Image: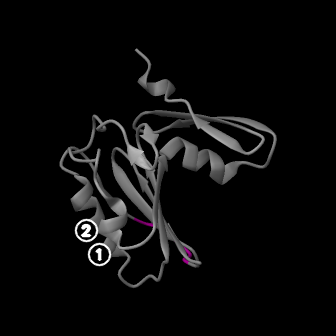
Amino acid sequence: MNVLVIDIGGTHVKVLATGQDAHREFDSGPSLTPKRMVSKVRKIVADWKYDVVSIGYPGPVLRNRPVSEPWNLGKGWCGFNFEAAFKRPTKVVNDAAMQALGSYKGGKMLFLGLGTGLGSAVIVDGIVEPMELGHLP
């Protein structure tokens, strides 16, 4: 199974798929809506084959859906149907949780990701919990 992984950041969207040697990216920012993101991703990966999509979203996610609009991107992320847009099974997770899982080797791990914001997650015995420390008042 080939997986297309999408990391939505405050300044760039990066994509990589199973079997590819290098990621591709494009600029993000206040004008990037989910519809535009999907369109741009589909365009830059048109020559890649993938069966499923995994999206790292820069904010809280519950039951495969963003629960708040990101402050640094366009509107429309909450309630957007990513699976219908990509026409493939799609999983949306918090971006810090996705990054943490990518480097997890077992046991307990605290992940802090510094980018446009502060991403955070903790993993204990394979169970990941996004922490959203960057959203504390």
Which percent across, then down, holds residue 133?
51, 25
Is residue 130 left or right of 66 when viewed as pictured? right
Q: Quadrant of residue 112?
A: top right
Dominant secondary-structure state across the stretch colored magenta: loop
Residue type, numbered disc 1: Lys
- Using the image as rendered, state which of residue 117 and residue 131 is in the foreground: 131
Callout 1: helix, strand or loop?
Answer: helix
Which percent across, then down, holds residue 59?
41, 38
Q: Which residue is mark 2?
A: 39
Which percent across, then down, holds residue 126?
73, 45
Residue range corresponding to the magenta coloring = 20-24
Quadrant where the C terminus sits is top left
Would you say residue 119 sits in the magenta stretch? no
- Using the image as rendered, state which of residue 75 and residue 26 is in the foreground: 75
Q: Which of the numbered marks, if any, corresponds to residue 43? A: 1
Residue type, numbered disc 2: Ser
Callout 2: helix, strand or loop?
Answer: helix
Q: Is residue 41 visible?
A: no
- Using the image as rendered, state which of residue 88 and residue 15 is in the foreground: 88
